Amino acid sequence: MFALRPSRILRDTLTKANVRVGAVLQNLQANHSHFIQDDWQSKLQTLNDYIAGVSVSVSTSKSRSGAKRIFKPQLEKWALTNDQSRARRELVVKIIFNKRVSDNWENSDIVHSIMEGFPAGAVSRLMGYLNIHQKEMLRLLHITSATYSRRRKEGKLESVESDRVYRYTRLAALATEMFHGDGEAARKWLKSSTYGFKGETPLEYAQTEYGAREVENLIGRIRHGIPS
């Protein structure tokens, strides 16, 4: 990490860059929208949001040379350390497979496991981590009690059921990461009504793939300090 002294030139440059990107976006959307794919519009908007979000954080500390000013881009908030990424992965593997993650674990392992079917015990472990009743967990997963009893005897879930279990396990891990490893705070947040979801809780809203992505997006905005 290195420190830079913020100056009027730096602030003016950032402001001009922000205006320029905004003008480009408006021109493209107004005159050439049929040539622009949504993905590129999203990338341009992300660039604009970043430039607009760059902030100068000034910390002062008394020394012989006087106050020290530190330039701190907001992008630092977006960095995900290897330790955080591993902790999230370990929680997912622990809930689903009840084992520790190996060093050679890859995301493709989850994909194959979903296709083959998760262990039926993943439901009870997820239920225990979220601290909710079985009836509520099965309702969120769209699994009937009779089907769940049958799956427990068979020892394995169907592929579609496994996909739903992974959806909620991932959200639980992301929420826990958002609260810096505080599982209790994550559970409380996941079970609290959210204005952005019309009063529904994140758990309720995530019953569809689209809803789950919206919850993930909300978690991302909260982590990045973006107003929601």
Image (spheres, rainbow, N blue to C red):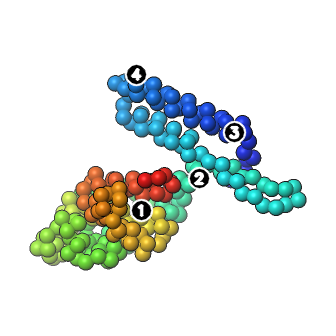
Q: CA distance from mark 4 to mark 2?
A: 35 Å
Seen at 88% across and 59% down, the residue is 64
Residue that label 3 marks: 10
Seen at 36% across and 31% down, the residue is 37
| Contact check, label 4 and label 3, Cβ < 8 Å | no
Instruction: Indicate the quadrant where residue 122 lies.
Output: bottom left
Q: CA distance from mark 4 to mark 3?
A: 32 Å
Q: Around disc 3, counting alpha carbons within 10 Å, would you say few (fewer than 14), some (14 to 19), or many (20 or more)?
A: few
Q: CA distance from mark 2 to mark 3?
A: 18 Å
Q: Which mark is residue 174?
A: 1
Q: Earlier in the sequence, mark 4 or mark 3?
A: 3
| Contact check, label 1 and label 2, Cβ < 8 Å | no
Residue that label 4 marks: 31
As drawn, 16 above or below 122: above
* Tag 4: amino acid: Asn
Residue 12 visible in the shown view:
yes
Q: Closer to the camera: disc 4 or disc 2?
A: 4
Q: CA distance from mark 3 to mark 1?
A: 35 Å
As drawn, 89 above or below 40: below
* Tag 2: amino acid: Glu
Q: CA distance from mark 1 to mark 4?
A: 40 Å
* Tag 3: amino acid: Leu
Rendered location of residue 203, percent (x, y): 30, 65
* Tag 1: amino acid: Leu
